[in-house]
Amino acid sequence: MRKLIESTFITTDGVLSSPEKWGAPYWDEEHSSYAAELLGEADALLLGRQTYEGFAATWPHRDGDDYSKRINALPKYVASRTLIGTETAWNATVIKGDVAEEVARIKKEPGKNLLKFGTGELDRTLIEHGLVDEFHLWMFPVIAGRGQRLLDGLDITHLERLRTREFANGITVMVFGPK
């Protein structure tokens, strides 16, 4: 059974919005290496509509490195109630019907991990149905002070720390799983 891995950048005060504004100074070789490990262990991406639209507008124009080539080549599953199949490109399939049921079905298929980027409404559904196997929370040594917070409004969800990885630049990746 495939694992569903959630990978999310956050500030020390729990903000996840606009990582391009506060995260860029920390995107170095160690950061890139860990990101490449996660991507290398996956054979498909799971994205919500907003993340899909943002990624699809940017990533197809990048192809000069192995990471870009890999992210562009992987199949993508997109959870959206507003997109229809003909509106997607970039090797994407819109999940039709019940998202939780479809993700559970995809997880049962043989293959590598399913990697999910972007945090929002889709995560609430996935967490409520116990579908996330690991949360890779990349905590950056930054205080944003304002912005969308990680999983605001979600009911209490207890997690178990699986491992931690600290980078020389101050990023700490905390890996949690369901308790």
Image (tube, rainbow, N blue to C red):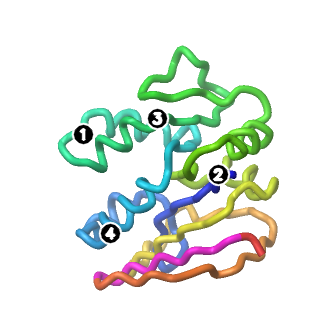
Query: Residue 65's spot in the image, x, y percent?
Result: 21, 47
Where does label 2 land, which residue?
2
Q: Tell me what residue is drawn at x 63 percent, y 74 percent.
A: 176
Q: Which residues are magenta?
A: 169-177
Discs 1, 2 touching: Cβ within 8 Å? no
Three-letter residue code for mark 1: Arg
Q: What's the distance in space between the residues labelled 3 and 2, CA to CA?
A: 25 Å
Disc 1: which residue? 62
Q: Is residue 174 magenta?
A: yes
Question: Residue 25 at what x, y percent from top left?
Answer: 25, 70
Which residue lies under the disc numbered 3?
Answer: 53
- How many neighbours does mark 4 have within 10 angstroms: few (below 14), some (14-19), or many (20 or more)? some
Residue visible at 66% across and 30% down in the picture: 95
Q: Which residue is mark 4?
A: 31
* Magenta residues, dominant SS class: strand
Q: Nearer the viewer, mark 3 or mark 1?
A: 1
Residue type for callout 3: Glu
**Amino acid type of the residue tagged 4 in the rendering:** His
Q: Is label 1 in a helix, a strand or a loop?
A: loop
Pick whichever of labels 4 and 3 is earlier in the sequence. Answer: 4
Instruction: Give the mark, 4 or 2, whose residue is nearer the N terminus.
Output: 2
Q: Earlier in the sequence, mark 3 or mark 1?
A: 3
Vertical arrangement, residue 138 with respect to residue 81, above or below: below
Classify mark 2: helix, strand or loop.
loop
